[in-house]
Amino acid sequence: MTLFFFYAFLATGMLNFICSILVLRGLAEAGIKVGFFEIRWHVHKHLKTYRQISMQKTGHIAWPYYGYQASLVAMIGFGLLTLISLDR
């Protein structure tokens, strides 16, 4: 079971990374300057801006916004489950 949780942790981590790249790519297309360093460490500060831009452009919030948040929560949850299952 530990391996399952660990692999799920890795999969949600990759999904989170992909969503962060899509969020920052959407910001760059809108003309907002984002640096390479911000891909992993400062995505949170751009989420509100990305949400507003996607609402203005399409009329609804784009899926990478929710994908980033959901995969972050899932990654934390699977990380905790992996650590808990190591104790057994």
Image (cartoon, grey):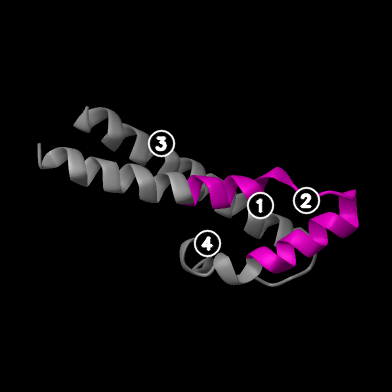
**Nearer-N-terminus badge (2/3):** 3
Label 4 to label 1, Cα distance in Å?
Answer: 14 Å
Q: Which of the two marks, 4 or 1, is nearer to us in this view?
A: 1
Identify the residue shown where x is 72% and y is 56%.
26
Q: Are marks 4 and 3 in contact (CB under 8 Å)?
A: no
Q: Residues within 10 Å of mark 3 (few under 14, many from 20)?
A: some
Q: Secondary structure at mark 3?
A: helix
Q: Which residues are magenta?
A: 47-72
Indicate which disc residue 65 carries.
1
Tell me, yes or no, whether the highlighted magenta stretch contains residue 88.
no
Give the Cα distance between marks 4 and 2: 20 Å
Q: Specify the label residue 1 is tagged with.
A: none
Q: Which residue is mark 2?
A: 61
Tag 1: residue type?
Tyr
Mark 2–mark 3 CB contact (< 8 Å) = no
Q: Residue tagged by mark 4?
A: 39
Q: Do the CB atoms of the residues marked 4 and 2 lie less than 8 Å apart?
A: no
Residues at circles 2 and 1 in contact by the CB criterion of under 8 Å:
yes
Q: Would you place residue 11 above or below residue 35 in this image?
A: above
Residue type indicated by callout 3: Ala
Q: Percent from the top left, x then y, of residue 45?
A: 60, 72
Q: Quadrant of the C terminus?
A: top left
**Given the image, on which type of amino acid does mark 4 rest?**
Ile
**Residue sitting at 20 percent across and 46 percent down?**
83
The earlier-in-sequence mark between 3 and 1 is: 3
Tell me the CA gap for discs 4 and 3: 18 Å
Classify mark 2: helix, strand or loop: loop
Q: CA distance from mark 2 to mark 3?
A: 24 Å
Residue drawn 69% across the image and 72% down it: 33
The residue that mark 3 highlights is 11
